[in-house]
Image (cartoon, rainbow, N blue to C red):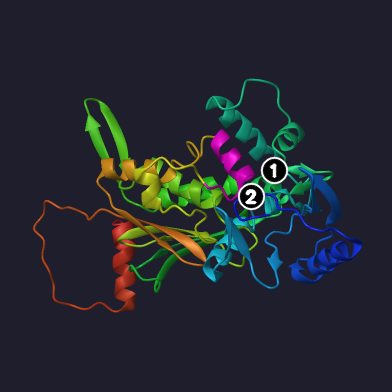
Amino acid sequence: MKPNGDVVGQDVSESSMRDVSRTVYESIRPQIYPAIEEVILEEKHLIKVEFSGENAPYSAAGRYYLRTADEDREVSPEELREFFSANKYRGKWEKAKSESTSKQIDKPAIRSFWQKAIAAGRLPEGRYTCPLILKRYGLVTGEYLTNAGEALFGTTGPVALKAGIFATNEKLTILDMKSSEDNIYNLLSIAEEYILKNIRWRSEITGIERKEITEIPVAVVREVIANSFAHAIYDGRTIHEICIHPGMVTVYSPGEYASNHSPDDYIKGNFESEIRNASISKILYLSGSIEQFGSGFKRINSLCKDAGIKYSYENTKNGFKFIIYRPVIQSDNLSVTLDVTLNGTEMSVLAILKQKPDASR
């Protein structure tokens, strides 16, 4: 066959069939076992090689190729690394059988899920049971939960979260630390509660109504946390992490950023979301934890802009960190700047007083 697709044909013999079979056997890794036969197309004799497999990517003579237009282009090491990263968990990890049985489930969490999904208008009214929900959304395989099912609703503490408060913007002096091992559905509430409890609130009185307002909008906190759990890698060695500093709140998600499009691309354009954990994202969407696929960054950007707060992010090979900068405290009182340096203990005391001005000695 010519590069443009025109069929040329060839002399086909038992020897040429054996040569093709031997070349495929010796060159392709992981090893494949194709069906090889002679076919006649437009009066031309051809050798048809056909196979299917789920162990992509396959190499030929130790190299990887990508079909582009009418040529085979060798894949670069960077492209290969991105391929493995993007496809390591997509569909495979979520659907694989976990070690938890279908009875090791958090029934209150599942009931809460379908109640929220109905209230959000994303699940029709009806009579639901825990087994029905698990089966409908592919969270069980036989008598066992899938990995996604265990992570979402398991009772074995499948996902770890570490949250802490620090005296400075460096991770040095720890004022508080909390570790949790639970399912994703419960950790969403645990993470949100920890952040909201440890950031500043103010009261605004309009008429006879009093309104409590957070320095970081609740909607921003929820969106960042939900996206962190939706796009994480769950069989790595690192864990989810929340750090509250005097000047910022960071939410760390284990696993490299899942998309080829940058967060700025999603903010400025309308790109389709590249979903790493489709089953987990589906459950979070139905329960209202995330608004819609691919809109997270755009929504966070809009909410932060409206609230007048800044944010940034850091992407590494090990994880993705979202950083929300806390507003600077404004005071009507006379401010005095002291040319002093505080030691570690003094910095800790100052940080505690900033969090709780009425703290005792």
Mark 2 or mark 1, earlier in chain:
2
Image quarter of the C terminus:
bottom left
Q: Magenta span has 41? A: no
**For residue 277: magenta?**
yes
Residue 102 seen in render: no
Residue at figure coordinates x 67%, y 61% from the top left: 57
Give the residue at x 76% y 47%: 145
Residue 106: image tag? 1
In front here: 5 or 36?
5
Q: Residue furthest right?
A: 14
Report the span colored magenta.
274-286
Above or below residue 68? Residue 177 is below
From the image, give the main secondary structure of the stretch colored magenta. helix
Element at label 1: loop
Residue type for callout 2: Gly
Asked if the residue under mark 1 is in contact with the one under mark 2, i.e. CB atoms within 8 Å, the reply is no
Local crowd size for mark 2, using a 10 Å CA cut-off: few (<14), some (14–19), many (≥20): few
Q: Is residue 75 left or right of residue 102?
A: left
Residue 219 picture location, percent across and down: 40, 40
Callout 2 secondary element: loop
Determine whether, in the image, residue 150 is placed left or right of residue 81. Answer: right
Residue 163: x and y, percent?
Answer: 48, 60
Q: Residue 180, relative to residue 112: is it above or below?
A: below
Query: Comparing marks 2 and 1, which lies closer to the viewer?
Result: 2
- Spatial CA distance of label 2 from label 1 is 56 Å
